Each structure stands twice: as structure tokens, then as C-alpha cells.
Image (cartoon, rainbow, N blue to C red):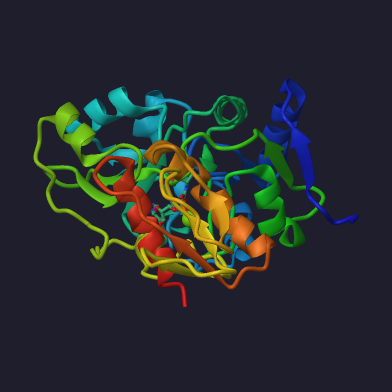
Amino acid sequence: MSNSPYLSNCTADTIRDGAAALKAGYLVAFPTETVYGLGADARNPNAVKRIYEVKGRPSDHPLIVHISSINQLEKWASEVPDYAIALARNFWPGPMTLIFNRSEIAKDFITGGQDTVGLRVPNDPIALALISEFEKNTESAIAAPSANRFGHVSPTTAHAVFSELGEYLTEDDLILDGGLCSVGVESTIIDCTGNCPRVLRPGAITEKMIVEVTGLKLSAEVGINGASEIRVSGSLESHYSPLAMVLLDQPPIAGQGFIALAKLPTPDGVIRLASPQDNEEFAHELYASLRAADDLGLTHVVVFQPQGAGIAIAIRDRLFRAANGR
Ligand code: TXA
Ligand code: MG
């Protein structure tokens, strides 16, 4: 297909090509440890506009700005409380997005018109190399939502990015292939605009870890059924959905897909899509196995949710929304 984006294995050359494509205003999908992002120059309104078009996402939903290190934080954020510095020092690079009052370079087209900006330093060598190379040549950073169509399952492989977005990207856009994402669910989002941190979206950085590092109580919990007045599209009740109907914690019947910890047996005629050994592996395999349900044309997929705290909270949050997807 002549208008397909270039899907590339990563070398130093392709990282340079990626940074050059971003500088020229094109889109570059890249791996992070959570999920793949669809990147654009965070200071180029036309490039950012294309992210919204390619994703089919409403333009008032803000984008995360990906920076190369904590040193870039104050370029984009205007008030940074001490507890946020502690979080950044401990968990960046890593699966954590911090929300701050914005500086003047974070324009409305990035923040969805809000006075806050989301920042993250991802822990992936390709992402970090791409962001550093891009920052070196510009005074900018990379705005990137997850590289899926709005409301769909986030991609954890480059091929999943291609199957989600290939038809909407052009031959000048790039998809960098960094293999399977190690964490597998999106970053923890923490609102740092108040006196205490507030979790807006659970992820691999857990509330317990946040409390340990900051010594503060969290100001309010946004739980599985929680709502927030800040616009976080991942907090919509219908999100992260495959085409197959997701059913939670009920006995699967023949012909249905099934995702559960390895210790749980597969009933006769049921199509096992994943058998993770523990909750980390569950997160790592979840989105690829939901996609596999669609690839196999299954109409239903049953998921036995992992119990307990830690990353299981993020998994249950995403599954609750995936199951409400219709
Ligand atoms: O792990 C991740 O966070 C991935 C990788 C690519 O970094 N990104 C990601 O982006 O999940 P996205 O756009 O699919 O989800 C980010 C969420 C959105 O729900 C958005 O509304 C919220 O972050 N967000 C971004 N900036 C915000 C802000 N200033 N205030 C509140 N929420 C914000
Ligand atoms: Mg997303």
C-alpha cells in the first residue's frame, strides 16, 4: 500500500528518522513500557491536530507530553510541589504521568483547553532515545496518546498499532517497532495540583508506592467506579474495548474466549486466550489477548479478574470499562 506508514525495526538511524519526521510535522508511533504512543511535536498545532483525526478522538481531551528527564519538567509545568519532585525522582523514567498547572508553552491544543498539563518520562530505551534526539533539535517534546482509535484497546505491539491506525496514517508517518511492551497497561495518572497527590487513573505505580515516597495521604481516590471533574478519557465508563463483548467473572461456555490466571482450568470447548502466572504477567498479556479475541472473530470473551492490590487494581479498572463498552 503506497500510503502506508513505514513500520520499522529500531536502529540509531530510524530514531534519527523518527525525530526528523516529528520535526517536519509528521506522526511517529513509538513503544513505551506501558503501551505504544502516537507521537507528534507538542508545540506544532497542525501535527497535534492530526493525532486527534487519526485517533478519532474529541479535541477537548488532553494529551500527555513525553519528556526525556526531570530536567524538562519546569519547562512545561508552572508550579511543582515537593511531593511531585519526590515522585518524579523515584518513579521516572517509569509508568507514571504527573498533572501540573501548565507553563505558557503548553497551549490549549495540548491541554484540551485546561490549565493543566500531563507529563511523563517513559522507561523504554527507544522512547527515551527518540525524545532526547527530538528535544536536542527543537525546544519541544513529544505529545502522545495511546496509539489506538478512540475507545479501543491500547496497542502493546507495533503490529497492533498498524492494525489500529495503518489506514489513517500516511507514508511520511512512522511506526517504530520495539517489540512487546513490558508493563502492558497505561501509566498511573497523578494530579499534582493540590496539597496532596490524587490518583486519576490507576497503573503500575500504586497508591501504596505513592504514599511511601511522599509520606502524604492521597487526597481522594478515583476508584473503579469513580469519577473526576478533570477530563481523563480513560476514566470514561466505556473505554479499552475490543469488538468482542467482555464478560467478567462468570463461567465461560463453549465457543467463548477465556482469560484467567494459569491456575484456573479451561472448560471444554472454551478458547483459552491467556494463562498468566501472576498479576504482572496478566497486565502484560491482557491487551494482546483481547485483540486475539477479535482476530479470531469471537463474539464473547470471559475474563476472571485478578484479585488483591498492586497492578490488579489497574487491571480491574480497565476491565470494568472494557466490559461497559456497549
Ligand atoms: O501509559 C500511558 O500513559 C500512555 C503512553 C503512550 O504514555 N499514554 C496514554 O495516553 O495512555 P492517553 O491519551 O491514551 O491517556 C492519557 C490520559 C487521557 O485520559 C487524558 O485525558 C489524561 O491522560 N490527561 C492528559 N493530560 C491531562 C491533564 N492535563 N489533566 C487531566 N488528564 C489528563
Ligand atoms: Mg488511551
Looking at the rendered image, the quarter that the N terminus falls into is: bottom right
Q: In this view, does 46 lie to the left or right of 117?
A: right
Q: In this view, does 78 lie to the left or right of 211?
A: right
The one of 132 and 316 positioned closer to us in this rendering:
316
Residue 277 at x, y = what percent? 44, 37
Q: Is residue 181 left or right of residue 216?
A: right
**Total label count?**
0
Residue 314 at x, y = what percent? 34, 49
Q: Residue at x 66, y 51 (%)?
A: 160
Q: Residue at x 39, y 24 (%)?
A: 71
The one of 284 and 33 positioned closer to us in this rendering:
284
Q: In this view, does 301 lie above or below 32?
A: below
Q: In this view, does 156 lie above or below 131?
A: below
Q: Which residue ends up furthest to the front in the rendered image?
A: 268
Residue 73, by quadrant, is top left
Residue 216 at x, y = what percent? 10, 36
User: Can residue 114 be seen by looking at this rendering?
Assistant: yes
Q: Which residue is drawn at 80% across and 44% down?
A: 6
Q: Residue at x 43, y 57 (%)?
A: 62
Q: In this view, does 155 lie to the left or right of 218?
A: right
User: Can residue 146 be seen by looking at this rendering?
Assistant: no
Q: Which residue ends up furthest to the right in the rendered image?
A: 2
The one of 300 and 226 positioned closer to us in this rendering:
300
